[in-house]
Amino acid sequence: MVALVAFSTVTLGACSRDGRTLAPALPEQTESVAIAPTDTTVSLTPSDDFSVTGPWIEGGEIDLAFTCYGRKVSPPLEIIAQPGGTVSMAVLLHAVDAPDEIVWLVANLAGGTVALGEGALPPDVVVATNSDGSPGYSPPCPASGERRQYLLTVFALDTRLDVANVTAADGTIDSEQLLTAVEMATFDLAEATFYVQAP
């Protein structure tokens, strides 16, 4: 599921007609049935204006304070020019070479939010369980000496998500199910990349 995000593309299933011919209509049949085209592919790519910035130069290295080698806190973010109609937003962080490993996934960030503080989230934000099995931010942690690239995506959603269906009995939020809900409601997105150079 995360792979769809990594390629910034949401593709709807397509099928083709099978070539069969319909029988002639009988006199008592007065209604027509129209067959809508189903060969539909929708691509979602980042908007030119909608953007997200953090404590790194785009495509550059992030300070180790935001990794397992530092203070292990989530980076501050600035969300710029979110599109009209944004009801809520979600934030996803994962390594480019391992899109199924979720570092950070939060949703129901209120539309109109322009910034997130270092290590801080509004109280009503939904926080998913990361790939380490704990809720919240799992700081990037490449092996010693390794340099690894990460992709941060902010999704603009046209609704506020009902997370009851993705909440387990113990109150944790399933990241895969939450991400599916996010993708279904997304109409625009912003992306930023950075590297972590492990000492």
Image (cartoon, grey):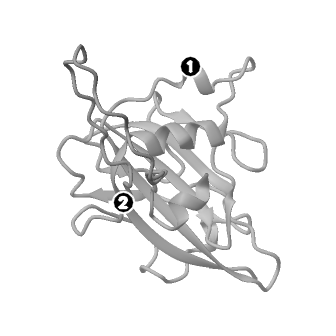
Disc number for residue 164: 1
Toward the viewer: 157 or 14?
Answer: 14
Counting from the top left corner in percent of width and height, residue 23 is at 37, 34
Split into 4 quadrants, where in the image is the C terminus?
Answer: bottom right
Q: Tell me: 24 left or right of 150.
A: left
Earlier in the chain: of badge 1 and badge 2, it is 2
Quadrant of res 111 = top left
**Residue under the point 63% across and 50% down:** 137
Q: Tell me: 198 left or right of 63.
A: right
**Residue under the point 50% across and 37% down:** 181
Disc number for residue 44: 2
**Residue under the point 58% across and 71% down:** 150
The residues tagged by marks 1 and 2 sit, at their Cα atoms, a distance apart of 27 Å
Toward the viewer: 32 or 139?
Answer: 32
Q: Nearer the viewer, mark 1 or mark 2?
A: 2
Quadrant of res 190 = bottom left
Residue 139 visible here? no
Quadrant of res 72 = bottom right
Q: Secondary structure at mark 2?
A: loop
Neighbour class for label 2 at 10 Å: few (<14), some, many (≥20)?
Answer: some
The amino acid on which the numbered mark 2 sits, given as a three-letter code, is Leu
Q: Residue furthest right?
A: 144
**Residue under the point 41% across and 54% down:** 154
The amino acid on which the numbered mark 1 sits, given as a three-letter code, is Ala
Counting from the top left corner in percent of width and height, residue 117 is at 43, 50
Q: Secondary structure at mark 1?
A: helix
Above/below status of 10 relative to 147: above
Toward the viewer: 131 or 25?
Answer: 25
